[in-house]
Image (tube, rainbow, N blue to C red):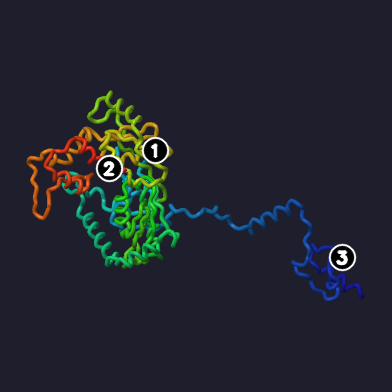
């Protein structure tokens, strides 16, 4: 009779249960059926188990992410193009761009160096104009449109407002001593590219915490330091309060507010220079082919005027060439060690500033000719400079207050002029040569 309940319980057990040895003894004592989660499942073949594991892992696996892309300055992210209120055309270099000579072509398509869609000004291949170039009338006497003239006037008024009252001598002396090399290391270097567009951003960054910034100029731009100083003041809006050689101190102004500084969009790369006409032609204007060849051969044997050092200071080069033309019609400048682009740019500056005619760049030498209009001997040049000496009969001399009429001269002092014009006798050639050589400043 005691075996009957156990048999009945085993009869009520669901089919498919494992043998008794896998079950607990509680089933016999309390008479309940274990849940399905506690009942071990029969062993599956190994391939089926591996497939099930792979499917479960695939469900739990996260979706693949896109590969990492570093942030790009060309990707605006849907932002609008940058806008700048600076009222001048954006160029790569403001001191080295040739405004007089027009290019004859471009070396690359008109890709904006500011990046695609980063600036609201179009790139013409030379600059990004502040005013649409289609508004200019080339046939008109004044090609500047009214909008551009208004921008120039607004820039002048804003610069006067920011500068405020002029500095007193004590304030100027204090600022000059404060920003010398032995007092601060803050300095901006101006090299062979001249005043570049991105350098304007460096100047305003220094003006955030300093009233002035020291700028050191070396290389090709120093041939025309007057142009460098003018462009620095014009484009930055500051004032040069000190200049010693190639070292400048640029003052920001009394009412400069760093929080309201102008927006200066940065150039991402250097644009290719356009194609300009040939500097050295087959024949020099006014000479035949044979005369041009003889002049180039002769120029290589002329004594060297000076030797230019790499990245040097060349502010005295133009007056040296002008004075050398008083003694010789050809001048040779030694440029060994300089890059080819550097001494060619120096030759262009000499052509425009002296002025003179470029003869050759052979063997790393700059050879310039003063031209036929300025030709002749030293006596001829001196006679042209002193018309009162050659025409002494018609010269008028005033004795009132010991003031005498003096002929203008670009290379002689006032004392030399008065000393020659006061004599009633016509000087000879030796005297004229001595006066001309005394005015030279080698």
Q: Are marks 1 and 3 in contact (CB under 8 Å)?
A: no
Q: How far apart, in angstroms, are the residues tagged by discs 1 and 2?
A: 23 Å
Labels 1 and 3: the sequence-earlier one: 3
Res. 440 mark: 2
The x and y percentages for residue 411 are 23, 44
Q: Determine which residue is flagged by label 3.
A: 21
Q: Secondary structure at mark 1?
A: loop
Res. 335 mark: 1
Labels 2 and 3: the sequence-earlier one: 3
Taking the spot 29% from the left edge, 44% from the top edge, the residue there is 441
Compared with 315, 290 (above or below) is above
Report the number of discs.
3
The x and y percentages for residue 346 are 34, 41
Labels 1 and 2: the sequence-earlier one: 1
Q: How far apart, in angstroms, are the residues tagged by discs 1 and 3?
A: 105 Å
The x and y percentages for residue 204 are 37, 60
Viewer can see residue 128: no
> Can you tell which quarter of the image residue 65 is in?
bottom right
Taking the spot 8% from the left edge, 50% from the top edge, the residue there is 398
**Left of 154 or right of it: where is 299?**
right
> Can you tell which quarter of the image residue 254 is in?
bottom left
Q: Nearer the viewer, mark 2 or mark 3?
A: 2
Q: Nearer the viewer, mark 1 or mark 2?
A: 2
Pick whichever, 156 or 22, lies toward us: 156
Pick whichever, 337 or 340, lies toward us: 337
């Amino acid at each position: 009779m005691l075996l009957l309940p156990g048999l009945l319980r085993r009869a009520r057990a669901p089919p498919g249960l494992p043998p008794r040895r896998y079950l607990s003894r509680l089933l016999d004592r309390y008479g309940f059926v274990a849940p399905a989660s506690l009942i071990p499942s029969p062993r599956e073949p190994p391939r089926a188990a591996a497939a099930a594991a792979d499917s479960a892992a695939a469900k739990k696996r996260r979706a693949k992410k896109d590969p990492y892309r570093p942030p790009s300055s060309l990707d605006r992210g849907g932002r609008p193009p940058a806008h700048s209120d600076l009222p001048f055309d954006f160029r790569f270099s403001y001191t080295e761009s040739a405004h007089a000579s027009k290019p004859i072509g471009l070396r690359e398509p008109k890709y904006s160096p500011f990046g695609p869609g980063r600036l609201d000004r179009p790139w013409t291949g030379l600059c990004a104009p502040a005013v649409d170039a289609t508004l200019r009338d080339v046939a008109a006497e004044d090609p500047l449109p009214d909008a551009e003239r208004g921008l120039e006037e607004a820039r002048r008024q804003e610069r006067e407002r920011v500068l405020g009252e002029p500095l007193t001598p004590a304030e100027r002396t204090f600022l000059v001593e404060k920003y010398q090399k032995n007092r601060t290391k803050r300095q901006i270097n101006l090299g062979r590219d001249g005043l570049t567009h991105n350098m304007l951003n460096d100047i305003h960054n220094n003006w955030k915490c300093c009233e002035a910034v020291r700028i050191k100029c070396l290389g090709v731009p120093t041939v025309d330091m007057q142009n460098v100083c003018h462009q620095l003041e014009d484009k930055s809006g500051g004032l040069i309060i000190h200049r010693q050689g190639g070292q400048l101190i640029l003052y920001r102004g009394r009412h400069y507010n760093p929080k309201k500084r102008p927006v200066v969009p940065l150039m991402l790369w250097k644009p290719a220079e356009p194609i300009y006409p040939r500097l050295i032609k087959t024949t020099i204007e006014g000479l035949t082919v044979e005369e041009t060849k003889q002049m180039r051969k002769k120029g290589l044997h002329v004594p060297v005027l000076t030797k230019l050092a790499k990245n040097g200071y060349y502010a005295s080069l133009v007056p040296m060439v002008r004075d050398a033309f008083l003694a010789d019609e050809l001048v040779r400048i030694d440029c060994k060690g300089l890059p080819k682009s550097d001494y060619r740019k120096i030759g262009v500056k000499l052509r425009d500033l002296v002025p003179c005619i470029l003869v050759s760049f052979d063997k790393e030498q700059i050879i310039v000719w003063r031209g036929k209009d300025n030709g002749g001997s030293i006596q001829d040049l001196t006679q042209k400079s002193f018309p009162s000496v050659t025409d002494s009969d018609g010269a008028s001399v005033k004795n009132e207050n010991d003031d005498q009429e003096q002929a203008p001269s670009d290379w002689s002092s006032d004392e030399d002029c008065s000393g020659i014009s006061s004599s009633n006798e016509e000087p000879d050639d030796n005297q004229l040569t001595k006066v001309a050589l005394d005015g030279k400043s080698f």
